[in-house]
Image: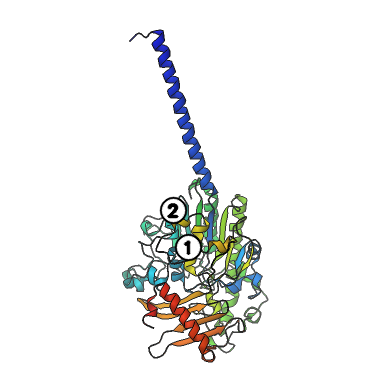
Amino acid sequence: MKNLSRRDFMKNVALAAMASTVGASLSSCANAVKKINVEEKTKMPNLIYVFPDQFRRQSLGFLNEDPVITPNLNKFASESLVLTDCVSCYPLCSPYRAMLLTGKYPAQNKVLTNCHSRRYKFHNELQKSDRCISDVLHDNDYSLGYIGKWHLESPLPEKNTYGEYTWTPPDRRHGFDYWCSYGSTGHHFHTHYYINSKSEKDVTEISEWSPKFETDVATNYIKNTNGKYRKPNQPFALFLAYNPPHPNYKEVPEKYVKMYDGKNYKDLLVRPNLDPKGETSEKAKGWVKNYFAAVTGIDDQFGRILNCLKEQGLDKNTIVIFTSDHGDMMGSHNLRSKNVWYEESMGVPFIIRWPGHIKPGKDDLLINTPDIMPTLLAMMGLKNKIPKDVQGKDLAGAFLGKKINRPDSSFYFLIKEGKPDSGRRGLRTHRYTFVISKSKKKNKIFLYDNKKDPYQLENIADSKPELVKKLTEKLYKKLTEINDPWVKNS
């Protein structure tokens, strides 16, 4: 061992002390930066986007239209901003979901109609190459969860499936790191799920009402039970896609049906546009009680989500949205289901709550479905991360109390499989619903004055040629702006 003089010894001690001090300072700085990053992440708002299938706007109890029981939604609406004129601009399951996630219209996102095995040859499904809202959030340190109906895959035809057992591989889940989903099904009491499955054979069968099961999963996700659902130091975004009140109308828990005991169809089907002699209107007499019961059941499960958020202390920093992909005609105009321009089909709830940021009240803002994606990203502080090919408009300012250029209309679409230039196009303004239905012989035109005729009983197109001309020009201009091929071949 080398002998050191006292002078050399003291010199080494001083150097060691200096190194220790510098090291401690660097460590302290690193910890401080880490702490700041964690704090910044926790300040970023969480998002819960709840969208049951086929839940029409008229079935919100507080609107006093359908005689439905929705106490939780009534209370939630009193704390939220309610969009009174919100519509699904393509009132069909798959197209709505694709527009929501991509921020693009059908001709660009390739989902022209509902996804299932018969449309595999058209590649009618969510494109792997599209950058969805979930991809953006995932890449910006969000934990992502998807629970419920997906309906964005078109499986190989030889699998002989309409969509029930549609497998979505992990690399097609667009950033969702927690996955409890399925393709599409009409079975609400016997539903299968792929739960973080890495194999198509890894299917979980559940024998209870699907919204009840999915809410159990969602509350576990919010609580992050046993740390298994999401990363604890990251904000989260959860998309919850209930299937009811979509048919099968019969499959709803009896406890919700009993809440409508003593009511017959005359008490429930109260809309003046019901055709008393129509075949479909006649069938609706047998559907309506269960449809409303399913609406009440969804309200009950949504209440559980809200209670869980509050119990976990997450309600103040979480954006909560309740909406739907489309409505349900339920016998109005002698029609069932959706995919038409009437308000019962197009009109959807849109109720949004973010305490301290969004002022409760009502707003007649006209929002197109693709607008939702960029609007939410901007609201969540990620405006500069909105993909450049997004067609929707950022309307965050309208929700946050700022003056913006407000849209004067929403689109309406109906497109045939594999034919992006086919079908119908229309506009829904604050006053009018205007639709052109393409035909080989002569296009059919529909025009309704929703102010004078809120139940859309009279097509006034023939008596308003100047208005038809004006709205046609407006429609063509707006379709040209989004590069819709329908314009060139109509």
Residue type for callout 1: Met
From this viewpoint, is residue 381 visible? Answer: yes
Up-down relation of residue 111 to residue 421 (above or below): above
454 sits to left or right of 28: right
Furthest toward the right, the residue is 262
Q: Is residue 99 left or right of residue 122?
A: right
Give the x, y percent position of residue 290.
58, 73
Up-down: is 433 above or below 98?
below
Q: Residue at x 45, y 20 (%)?
A: 17
User: Which color scheme is applied?
Assistant: rainbow
- Mark on residue 138? 2
Of 157 and 426, nearer the camera is 426
Image spot of residue 316 (x, y percent):
61, 53
Q: How packed is label 2: few (under 14 Cα within 10 Å), some, or many (20 or more)?
A: some
Q: Residue 216, labelled with which disc? A: none
Comparing 289 with 351, the one in front is 351
**Spot occupied by residue 173 in the image (x, y as percentages of width and height):** 40, 58
Residue 337 visible in the current orientation: no
Quadrant in which the N terminus appears: top left
Q: Quadrant of the C terminus?
A: bottom left
Mark seen at residue 373: 1
In-front residue for pair 242/130: 130
Q: Earlier in the sequence, mark 2 or mark 1?
A: 2
- Percent across and percent down for residue 203 are 41, 59
Q: Residues within 10 Å of mark 1 (few under 14, many from 20)?
A: many
Q: Amino acid at mark 2?
A: His
